[in-house]
Image (cartoon, rainbow, N blue to C red):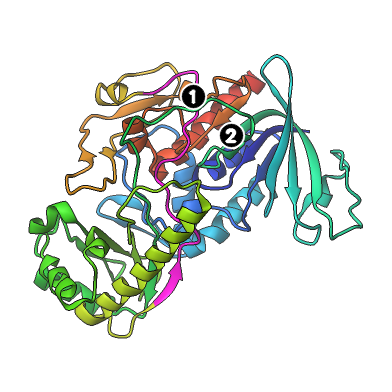
């Protein structure tokens, strides 16, 4: 029996689980992979995008900054403290949650549930492949198992009772299992997917001096010396080619056959905190909208994205000074998905709410991050929002079950509003904010 079960140990899930546990609630975190952090770690989505100077539900973010800084795996670049080393963050997150008393089931998925007639989830069923890989045995004295743990070749099933459930799976997998209602996109409303990767062996100082030669616009290509190390970033989208100093090199590479036109539709790179020779890439981006639930389509997309990574890495080695000895060191363990299922909540947050800076009685976050839609065309998908806006906790409550909450990109919001709220810092605030709300419901 747990007070709260959090399903999904990604960005929103770790913040929720930590907050629940340090506030005295018995918390179980179920993660289908063998590490925490989701897109922050395995997805290589670094650094975090800045969302303004919000003071709402940033405790977990500030704790990550402090713990990562202790081991030299965090920097503040251009006023953004969310520059983390994704490799070190896996270890730090596990340490933070275990010290907080969170019970963690790795390599585990939720395969079933029991609900009452009065719209409440009563229990869930968690399953793993074999007892050698899972920590399920430590719960034997608390919950019923319908398997013999001695038979290690069988799938384990653990029936777990809970008062509240938080679906932080990103794709709202538990909500789908429960047959919850979801919001539908209008025609043409969707986001492109990406696959991130890293290269090591880069002479960062040489590359930085090369960038200064080609692009003097520090708003587009900022370069800073932090703790004696050079850090930098640059970005390009095909609808802003005339504003980027490196664009002629991409033109030359396309003409020479080193890149395709599609490889150039989006290009962004960053240095990595605590690593002297690594560059993280926010690309390639697949040029067409795909059905992320069609396995064949996803497989074909993976192939194209991996082939594009080979081309982009080769381009960097040939055209960028400092990359002569560089090599691909890591590829994200999954396609980066910006928009998937969005649950129908007790409140559907809208583009008008966001642009109008509507206030709420129970906000879980504040942000000024813009509407950000990755489109197939050459017109910009970014719509600037200069005022801060709030998100209510009711947009994280399922309309179908009174004790089911969501946190992360699967929130109850229309397409445009979700595109502004899907970024990591906002997801951290959602996880923390919904956890604090649940603490109040249980403790009063």
Q: Where is residue 264 drawn, in percent x and y?
A: 23, 62
In magenta segment, residue 342: yes
**Relative to the observer, which residue lies in front, 289 or 423?**
289
Q: Residue at x 35, y 76 (%)?
A: 277
Q: Is residue 235 left or right of residue 29?
A: left
In magenta segment, residue 419: no
Rendering quarter of residue 388 = top left
Residue most extreme to the bottom: 325
- Position of residue 76 relative to residue 250, above or below, is above
Q: Residue at x 20, y 33 (%)?
A: 386
Q: Which residues are magenta?
A: 328-349
Q: Is residue 297 left or right of residue 286?
A: right
- Position of residue 163 relative to residue 339, above or below, is above
Residue 103 appearing in the image: no
Residue identified by numbered label 1: 344
- Position of residue 265 relative to residue 385, above or below, is below
Q: Is residue 170 left or right of residue 224?
A: right
Q: Residue at x 57, y 61 (%)?
A: 91
Residue identified by numbered label 2: 176
**Tag 1: Cα neighbours inside 10 Å, few (<14), some, or many (≥20)?**
many
Q: CA distance from mark 1 to mark 2?
A: 11 Å
| Mark sitting on residue 358 | none
């Amino acid at each position: 029996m747990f007070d709260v079960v959090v399903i999904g140990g990604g960005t929103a899930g770790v913040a929720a689980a930590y907050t629940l546990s340090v506030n005295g609630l018995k918390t179980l975190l179920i993660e289908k992979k063998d590490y925490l952090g989701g897109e922050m770690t395995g997805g290589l989505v670094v650094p975090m995008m800045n969302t303004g100077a919000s003071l709402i539900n940033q405790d977990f973010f500030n704790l990550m900054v402090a713990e990562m800084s202790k081991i030299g795996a965090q920097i503040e670049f251009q006023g953004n403290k969310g520059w983390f080393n994704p490799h070190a963050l896996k270890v730090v997150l596990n340490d933070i949650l275990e010290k907080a008393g969170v019970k963690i089931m790795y390599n585990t998925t939720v395969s079933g549930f029991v609900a009452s007639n009065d719209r409440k989830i009563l229990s869930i069923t968690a399953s793993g492949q074999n007892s050698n890989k899972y920590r399920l045995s430590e719960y034997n004295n608390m919950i019923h198992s319908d398997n013999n743990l001695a038979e290690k070749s069988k799938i384990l099933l653990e029936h777990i009772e809970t008062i509240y459930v938080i679906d932080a799976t990103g794709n709202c997998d538990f909500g789908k299992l429960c047959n919850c209602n979801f919001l539908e996109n209008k025609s043409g409303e969707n986001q492109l997917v990406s696959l991130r990767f890293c290269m090591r062996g880069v002479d960062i100082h040489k590359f930085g001096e090369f960038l200064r030669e080609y692009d003097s616009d520090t708003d587009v290509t900022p370069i800073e010396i932090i703790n004696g190390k050079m850090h930098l970033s640059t970005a390009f989208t095909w609808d802003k080619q005339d504003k980027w100093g490196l664009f002629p090199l991409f033109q030359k590479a396309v003409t020479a056959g080193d890149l395709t036109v599609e490889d150039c539709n989006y290009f962004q790179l960053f240095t990595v905190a605590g690593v002297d020779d690594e560059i993280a890439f926010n690309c390639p981006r697949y040029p067409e909208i795909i059905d992320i639930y069609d396995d064949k389509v996803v497989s074909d997309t993976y192939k194209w994205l991996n082939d594009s990574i080979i081309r982009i890495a080769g381009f960097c080695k040939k055209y960028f000074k400092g990359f002569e000895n560089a090599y691909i060191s890591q590829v994200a363990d999954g396609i980066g998905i910006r928009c998937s299922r969005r649950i129908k909540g007790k409140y559907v947050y809208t583009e008008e709410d966001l642009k109008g800076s509507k206030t709420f009685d129970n906000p879980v976050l504040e942000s000024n991050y813009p509407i950000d839609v990755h489109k197939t065309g050459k017109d910009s998908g970014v719509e600037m929002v200069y005022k801060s806006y709030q998100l209510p906790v009711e947009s994280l409550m399922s309309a179908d079950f009174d004790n089911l909450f969501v946190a992360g990109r699967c929130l109850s919001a229309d397409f445009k509003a979700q595109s502004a709220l899907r970024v990591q810092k906002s997801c951290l605030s959602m996880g923390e904010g919904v956890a604090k709300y649940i603490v109040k419901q249980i403790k009063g």
